[in-house]
């Protein structure tokens, strides 16, 4: 059932709906059970249902990092990023011993990456505000995965043209060395033409110019992928007081040194427990997000060329070897590096959240379905390192239905789950119902008549020529196949003639379910800011219901 959201700052109301994740294609069993609070997943998420006031006390009791040094580093970083007054006030609030953090995070994608990045940030902001209203002092943080070296992923974004056609947009910086963290890669002189290409695909609206100015002011050739991402996120969420964390910062690395040292010293125990956890997951029918081999090691090494090299443990000679070079380390070497120059080490995906929750007094982390699977594994790392386990929540999840798509859904009586059907099937149903109903009925009557007459013939053949009756069954299938093929060709001809219908369905599918996946996994926020203007983010924030476990549909 749809409900309405009342917006206090604007005399407008939005219809919303919600759709169960289990009815959306390609959702993992672990994620569905997590959302439904199934008993099976309880062992993997021990704080999932813990009261936040109780959890806050435990987090604060176990927090050891020097808040003054931490917040001084954050202030310096945010000075360079030209952060808002609200953000600086939250950094000062984090200095206080009774303040906890609500965190979300994501890789630094081009032009902010996919929309789920925005939903993560807003979810953290919303919960932090809710906690403050309950008397639990909290600030929202966003961890930028600036050490990530998956450049192809960071360098890709999508734009939707006025016809609903999706185009992949990539930038072309100078030659990028393999395994280089995105925090070291500058956008380069081609970023101007990349921005131009992106905005030429967008429909022209009252907000196009100001949205383009925003992007052009931030995405300059000397900015890196992570610094531009950081500045954009701060511009979008400055008034909410969001604090950014860039983990490549040397001072933050040094504050993380103790947990680095402990993880290196206990890496074999971590490996053993991860293997045990993978068996537990498998026994309950769940998958592991990260393949953990016998040579697993929880860190990368950043060499003098700024390459992020994976490390693997060789038990034969008790050495840790770099996968992409001839360099090897004894455990004592890595412990010394962790103590003296921890900026040379980078936690892997299973270790990252443990470091994050050591560095900050994290009460809750918001992530997506993949991160939920990571957490089912790395929960054992928290326990191995004697760390309190952070509560994990799935971020809010939305499909934004623009007015044009909404009109199409209404005109043809389509529901959100109709977007999961193949386009040809969807169009055929619309042709039958709204365009050529009489012909569709005739096809149905022909099939009914053929079956009726063949049934009569079958009865006579059974009594007179049984062998021919068996032959008739095969021929029935062929006859009906020819009729169905003719019907399919008729549908295609009607769609070809009805260009308006075809375009409307193309646009609606491209907008609401692009690339056969949820909209939030493809489109980025710039598409929507250009279409709806700066109030768009406030509309989303106001629509977030942190208790909602389903995918939300927001009709603008």
Image (cartoon, grey):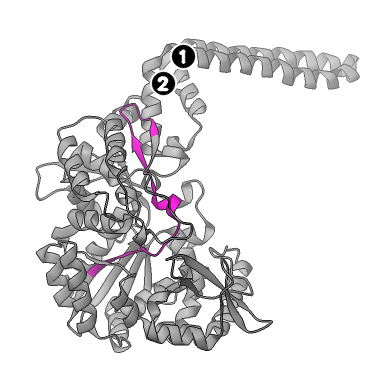
Q: Is residue 151 magenta?
A: yes
Q: In which quadrant of the rendered image does the C terminus lie?
A: top left
Query: 540 or 180: which is nearer to us?
Result: 180
Question: Measured from the top left, where is residue 479 in percent x and y?
Answer: 71, 15
Residue range in magenta is 140-166
Q: Is residue 158 magenta?
A: yes
Query: 468 or 197: which is nearer to us?
Result: 197
Query: 166 or 119: which is nearer to us?
Result: 166
Q: Mark 1 sits on what residue?
A: 496
Question: Which residue is drawn at the image coordinates 23% and 53% (left, top)?
Answer: 232
Q: Residues within 10 Å of mark 1 (few under 14, many from 20)?
A: few
Question: Which residue is drawn at the image coordinates 90% and 19% (left, top)?
Answer: 467
For the residues bearing labels 1 and 2, Cβ distance under 8 angstroms:
yes
Question: Measured from the top left, where is residue 319 in percent x and y?
Answer: 60, 82
Among the 4 quarters of the image, the one containing residue 394: bottom left
- The CA distance from mark 1 to mark 2 is 8 Å
Question: Measured from the top left, where is residue 155 in percent x and y?
Answer: 39, 49
Going by the image, does 236 lie left or right of 494?
left
Q: Earlier in the sequence, mark 1 or mark 2?
A: 1
């Amino acid at each position: 059932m749809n409900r309405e959201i009342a917006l206090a700052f604007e005399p407008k109301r939005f219809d919303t709906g919600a759709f169960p994740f289990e009815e959306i294609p390609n959702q993992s069993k672990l994620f569905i059970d997590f959302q439904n609070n199934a008993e099976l997943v309880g062992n993997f998420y021990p704080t999932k249902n813990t009261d936040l006031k109780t959890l806050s006390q435990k987090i604060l009791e176990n927090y050891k990092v020097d808040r003054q040094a931490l917040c001084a580093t954050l202030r310096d970083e945010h000075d360079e990023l030209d952060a808002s007054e609200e953000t600086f006030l939250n950094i000062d609030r984090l200095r206080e011993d009774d303040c906890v953090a609500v965190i979300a995070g994501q890789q630094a994608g081009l032009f902010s990456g996919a929309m789920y990045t925005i939903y993560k940030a807003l979810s953290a902001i919303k919960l932090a505000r809710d906690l403050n209203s309950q008397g639990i002092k909290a600030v929202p943080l966003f961890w930028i995965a600036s050490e990530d070296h998956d450049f192809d992923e960071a360098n890709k974004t999508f734009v939707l043209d006025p016809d609903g056609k999706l185009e992949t947009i990539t930038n072309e910086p100078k030659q990028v060395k393999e395994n280089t963290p995105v925090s070291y890669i500058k956008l380069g002189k081609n970023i101007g033409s990349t921005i131009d290409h992106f905005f030429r695909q967008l429909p022209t609206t009252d907000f196009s110019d100001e949205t383009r100015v925003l992007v052009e002011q931030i995405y300059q050739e000397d900015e890196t992928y992570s610094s531009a991402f950081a500045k954009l996120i701060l511009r979008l969420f400055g008034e909410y007081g969001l604090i950014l964390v860039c983990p490549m910062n040397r001072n933050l690395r040094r504050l993380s040194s103790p947990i680095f040292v402990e993880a290196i010293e206990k890496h074999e125990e971590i490996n053993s427990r991860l293997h045990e956890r993978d068996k537990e997951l498998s026994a309950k029918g769940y998958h592991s997000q990260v393949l953990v081999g016998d040579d697993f090691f929880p860190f990368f090494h950043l060499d003098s060329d700024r390459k992020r090299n994976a490390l693997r443990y060789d038990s034969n000679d008790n050495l840790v070897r770099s996968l992409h070079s001839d360099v090897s380390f004894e455990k004592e070497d890595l412990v010394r590096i962790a103590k003296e120059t921890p900026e040379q080490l980078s936690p892997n995906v299973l270790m990252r959240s443990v470091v994050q929750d050591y560095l900050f007094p994290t009460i809750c982390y918001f992530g997506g379905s993949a991160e939920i699977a990571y957490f089912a594994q790395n929960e054992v790392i928290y326990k191995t390192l004697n760390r309190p386990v952070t509560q994990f929540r799935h971020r809010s999840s939305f499909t934004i239905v623009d007015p044009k798509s909404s009109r199409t859904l209404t005109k043809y009586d389509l529901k959100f789950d109709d977007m999961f059907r193949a386009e040809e099937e969807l169009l055929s149903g619309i042709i039958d119902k709204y365009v050529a109903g009489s012909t569709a009925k005739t096809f149905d009557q022909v099939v009914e008549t053929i079956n009726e007459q063949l049934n009569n013939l079958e009865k006579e053949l059974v009594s007179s020529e049984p062998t021919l009756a068996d032959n008739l069954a095969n021929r029935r299938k062929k006859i009906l196949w020819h009729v169905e093929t003719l019907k399919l060709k008729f549908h295609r001809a009607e769609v070809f003639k009805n260009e308006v219908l075809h375009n409307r369905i193309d646009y609606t599918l491209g907008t609401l379910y692009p690339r056969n996946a949820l909209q939030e996994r493809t489109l980025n926020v710039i598409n929507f800011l250009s279409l709806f203007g700066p109030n768009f983010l406030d509309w989303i924030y106001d629509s977030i219901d942190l208790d909602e476990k389903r995918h939300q549909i927001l009709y603008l």
